[in-house]
Image (cartoon, rainbow, N blue to C red):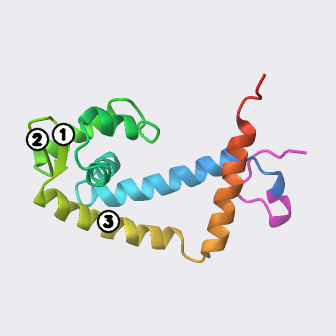
Amino acid sequence: MPATADPFAADGALAAQPIGYWSGAVHKAVVNLLRDAMAGIDVTQPQWWTLTRVDAGDGLTREAVAAQLADVAESPFEVPRAVDQLLHRGWIERDEARRLHLTGAGRAAQIRIRALVTDLRARIHEGIPDEEYVAALKVMQRMIANSRPAAG
């Protein structure tokens, strides 16, 4: 029988706990940790995503970056806003064809932010072997697949 969410449930009761509560609790905890740490170096999570995407797909337009990050953004305005902020800071620039590229300052910022994110990831993953992490992700992937509407 499914149980209501109980953050203090004993191990024997965890299998009956609702995934919606626990996945939401993890999301909230991790995002708050990341955003608070990033605020300490005057950067936002959407700015980090945007720097990374611009670097990986050097030569993308603003619209392409926004489209590629649409699934992680909270609103359709979040990534275009980050693009504007990064252009204003001089961390990215537009060429004549309006494609985006990292500047030297943007690359330096990306290195600083990556170091912060790497440290935070280590903190979040402390005591969790890679095999357990992969198993947890595979379980969540299966739950997502099981939650899709049935064909027909």
- Going 39% across and 40% down the picture, which residue do you hit? 68
Q: Percent x, y for residue 147?
A: 72, 37
State the separation of the CA atoms marked 2 and 1.
5 Å
Residue 8 lies within the magenta run:
yes
Circle 1 residue = 99
Left or right, 73 with reference to 145: left
Q: Which residue is denoted by mark 2 in the rendering? A: 95
Image quadrant holding the N terminus, namely: top right
Which amino acid is tagged 3?
Arg
Ranked by sequence position, the earlier of labels 3 and 1 is 1
Q: Which residues are magenta?
A: 1-14
Amino acid marked by disc 1 = Arg
Of mark 3 and mark 2, the one earlier in the sequence is 2
Residue at (26% x, 41% y) in the render: 60
Q: Where does the image place residue 140, in percent across and percent down from the top left? A: 67, 52
Please state, as top left, top right, bottom left or bottom right, where the C terminus lies in the image: top right
Which residue matches tag 3? Answer: 114
- Above or below, 42 against 79 in this view is below
User: Label 3 vs label 2: CA separation?
Assistant: 25 Å
In the shown orientation, is residue 62 left or right of residue 152? left
Local secondary structure at mark 1: loop
Which type of secondary structure does the marked residue at label 2 adopt?
loop
